[in-house]
Image: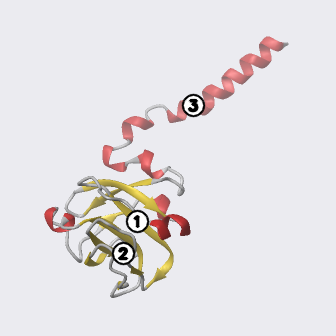
Amino acid sequence: MLIYKCRALVCLLLLAILPLQGFADQVKPQDNIVAETRDADEKTVALVFSNDVSIEVEFANDPQSRALGLMYRREMCENCGMLFKFDSVRIASIWMKNTYIPLDLAYINAFGKIIDIKQLVPHDLTSVASSMPVLYALEMNKGWFEKNGIATGDTVKLPSYIK
């Protein structure tokens, strides 16, 4: 009796697995299935800009990580940065309290369009606001956007799990 139950279980497993066979052959590399299925609580996020520049940056999507941002860091690698996701679409503002690294800030709307790129000065307590409502902000080293040919009006592909 036990043998028949085991065979039935094996048959059920095969029926569940067989339809998936060949699925991997249909996935294109640019589909990035792994990134699309990550948790929204991930600490990094992969971004692809409209000119095909791609980066992986830290992801600040909760109040604590947004408040800390890049404060107290003395250096950051060339292609490192931080993506902030706000709780809702709004006019956003960022300041540079306790931030030692000169940064460029891209404000990005909910559709991935870069609305503004602004330069931020270390330790400046002046709030730098977006010119329109946005959902995201991306901080990179000063000059990074220009060096990589990225400008206001360009778009960035954001993984669906963070939208």
Question: In whole angstroms, how far apart are the C-alphas of marks 1 and 3?
Answer: 48 Å
Quarter of the image holding residue 29? Answer: top left
Which percent across, then down, holds residue 45? 41, 55
Instruction: Name the one closer to the observer, 135 or 157.
Output: 135
Q: How crowded is mark 3: few (under 14 residues within 10 Å), some or many (20 or more)?
A: few
User: Could you tell me which secondary element the residue under label 1 belongs to?
Assistant: loop
Question: In whole angstroms, how far apart are the C-alphas of marks 3 and 2?
Answer: 52 Å
Residue type at tag 2: Met
Question: Who comes first in sequence, dot 1 or dot 2?
Answer: 1
At 36% from the left and 75% from the top, the residue drawn is 96
Which percent across, then down, holds residue 35? 43, 49
- Left or right: 122, with 33 as reference point: left
Image quarter where the N terminus lies is top right
At 74% from the left and 22% from the top, the residue drawn is 8
Which residue in the structure is indicated by mark 1?
A: 71
- Left or right: 73, with 116 as reference point: right
Which percent across, then down, holds residue 70? 39, 64
Which residue in the structure is indicated by mark 3?
A: 17
Q: Relative to 14, does residue 117 appear above or below in the rendering?
A: below
Residue type at tag 1: Met
Instruction: Name the one closer to the observer, 126 or 26.
Output: 126
Residue type at tag 3: Ile
Which residue in the structure is indicated by mark 2?
A: 96
Q: How crowded is mark 1: few (under 14 residues within 10 Å), some or many (20 or more)?
A: some
Q: How crowded is mark 2: few (under 14 residues within 10 Å), some or many (20 or more)?
A: many
